[in-house]
Image (tube, grey):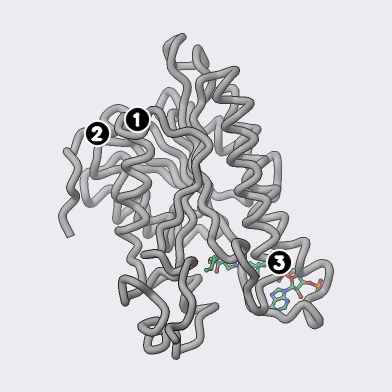
Amino acid sequence: MDSPFKPDVLRGKVALLTGGGSGIGFEISTQFGKHGASIAIMGRRKNVLDDAVSALQSLGIPAVGFEGDVRKREDAQRVVEATVKHFGKLDILVNAAAGNFLASAEDLSPNGFKTVMDIDSVGTFTMCHEALPYLKKGGPGRNSSTGGFILNISATLHYTAAWYQIHVSAAKAAVDALTRNLALEWGTDYDIRVNGIAPGPIGDTPGMSKLAPQEIDSKARDYMPLFRLGTKWDIAMTAVYLASDAGKFINGSILPVDGGLWLSRPRH
Ligand code: HXC
């Protein structure tokens, strides 16, 4: 589907995306690149990174991949520094890396809970923390009046409760708290905007194939106002909007992009 935005809305921007090599993260990488940004992606699997970088480059997008695990502070620091060394600066950080599996609270080990918290919540904080020196106004390669932009991908699970996803719900609730608190502190002190997107079920993603039972496609029609699963494009267009100047007064917002699903109740 064609973008409704002009192709230069992110011209000259440098973006680093964790989890940017697959799923929603890769679609955001692609759309940011198609709208003028240079793209660095961070992930744990070299083959996934290599394929993603080749795909981006074949579209004419300047792209580079760096192996790393957001759970390791030294990896976060190294990848942020390597991005700045490669492209000269950092304007946008997208935290899209996430861990997930279905497990009942009874069967989930505390280490399983901690693993997802470490990837989603602590990993997001770590990346933000290591990127701060480069994103703040007056940081390397930046002018003295404009700070960068952080986008955190969360979910809508924790707005209510979600079966067999206590670990993910807790982790994404923490991500939303990070978004608001960093928007307050770093928006005020450094002109950095920090926003979130909370996707609903999105088709053709690792999350959906891992988490959603087959019947969601048919049952969803009873619940969802827009009668369909979201697409990766829906999320990526929201990301382009928030990252562009169109979103320049948006800070600390977490935008649910789910067709209104989280509001829904069965019809009766
Ligand atoms: C129960 C599990 C488990 C499972 C891991 N654990 N998988 N418990 N069921 N299926 C437990 C382990 O038993 C262990 O605890 C602890 O978690 C760590 O496991 P490891 O395998 O050592 O961890 P690691 O190799 O680091 O892998 C962690 C991982 C990650 C979370 C499984 O590899 C992963 O999920 N990768 C997939 C990425 C992905 O699908 N991303 C898309 C996310 S979609 P013990 O006690 O045994 O030591 C998404 C959408 C959310 O986030 C919103 C949906 C609407």
Amino acid of disc 1: Lys
Residue 40 lies, in percent from the top left, at 43, 41
Residue 155's place in the image compared with 28, above or below, is: below
Q: Is residue 77 visible?
A: no
> Marks 2 and 3, how far apart in space?
37 Å
**Quarter of the image where ligand 1 sits:** bottom right
Residue corresponding to mark 2 = 9
The quarter of the image holding the C terminus is bottom left
Q: How crowded is the residue under tag 1: few (<14 C-alpha within 10 Å), some, or many (20+)?
A: many
Residue 76 sits in quarter: top right
Residue 117 lies, in percent from the top left, at 71, 57
Residue 201 lies, in percent from the top left, at 44, 70
Residue corresponding to mark 1 = 13
> Marks 2 and 1, how far apart in space?
9 Å
Residue for point 44% across, 11% down:
145
Is the residue at mark 1 in contact range of ligand 1, meaning its CB lies under 8 Å from it? Answer: no
Q: How crowded is the residue under tag 3: few (<14 C-alpha within 10 Å), some, or many (20+)?
A: many
Amino acid of disc 2: Val
Residue corresponding to mark 3 = 167
Most extreme residue toward the front, as rendered? Answer: 268
